[in-house]
Image (spheres, rainbow, N blue to C red):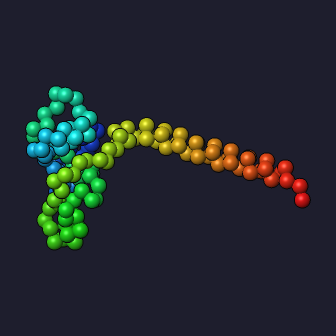
């Protein structure tokens, strides 16, 4: 089994204790939200598909604390849970690095601009 989310690399080779897989809900409204989240083409077969736990927030699980403490054998997803964590950077690490460099440059540029503004304001004040 492989996670149905586009570009997710979780598959059947991962141990169940490390990463749980969840089948799509029967509720048509929730099912539609899950399908949209996957970003797959229309030909994808969702009838036997799964989504891994990596796409859910901690609060989406009923028994996460019990599981982590060893009191539960498997993670239980809440009925109304909708996947919300999508990591497009997983698909292309080079793109992720470029995006991070661009963000860093923007931060540095902003700090330099702020520094120049504060320096110019200080220079105009006479003591």
**In the rendering, at what x and y percent does residue 119 appear?**
77, 50
Looking at the image, residue 112 sits to the left or right of residue 67; the answer is: right
Which residue is found at the position 29% from the left and 47% from the top?
A: 84
Question: Along the line of sight, which residue is nearer the eye, 60 or 17?
Answer: 60
**In the rendering, at what x and y percent does residue 90 appear?**
34, 43
**In the rendering, at what x and y percent does residue 83 appear?**
25, 47
**Is residue 22 depicted above or below 6 in this figure?**
below
Q: Quadrant of residue 16?
A: bottom left
Q: Is any part of residue 15 visible from this angle?
A: no
Q: Quadrant of residue 63?
A: bottom left
Which residue is found at the position 84% from the left and 49% from the top?
A: 124
Looking at the image, residue 73 sits to the left or right of residue 87; the answer is: left
Looking at the image, residue 28 sits to the left or right of residue 57; the answer is: left
Image quadrant occupied by the C terminus: bottom right
Q: Is any part of residue 109 visible from this angle?
A: yes
Looking at the image, residue 108 sits to the left or right of residue 61; the answer is: right
Which residue is found at the position 22% from the left and 40% from the top?
A: 33
**Is residue 16 depicted above or below 25 in this figure?**
below
**In the rendering, at what x and y percent does residue 8 appear?**
27, 42
Which residue is found at the position 65% from the left and 48% from the top?
A: 111
Image quadrant occupied by the N terminus: top left
In the displayed orientation, state which residue is furthest to the right: 127
């Amino acid at each position: 089994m492989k996670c149905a989310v586009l570009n997710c690399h979780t598959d059947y080779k991962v141990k169940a204790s490390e990463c749980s897989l969840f089948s799509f809900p029967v509720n048509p409204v929730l099912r539609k939200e899950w399908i949209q989240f996957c970003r797959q083409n229309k030909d994808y077969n969702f009838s036997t598909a799964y989504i891994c736990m990596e796409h859910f927030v901690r609060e989406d699980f009923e028994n996460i604390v019990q599981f982590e403490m060893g009191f539960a054998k498997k993670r239980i997803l809440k009925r109304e849970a909708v996947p919300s964590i999508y990591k497009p950077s997983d698909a292309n690490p080079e793109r992720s690095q470029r995006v991070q460099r661009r963000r860093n440059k923007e931060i540095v540029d902003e700090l330099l601009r702020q520094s120049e503004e504060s320096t110019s304001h200080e220079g105009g004040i006479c003591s």
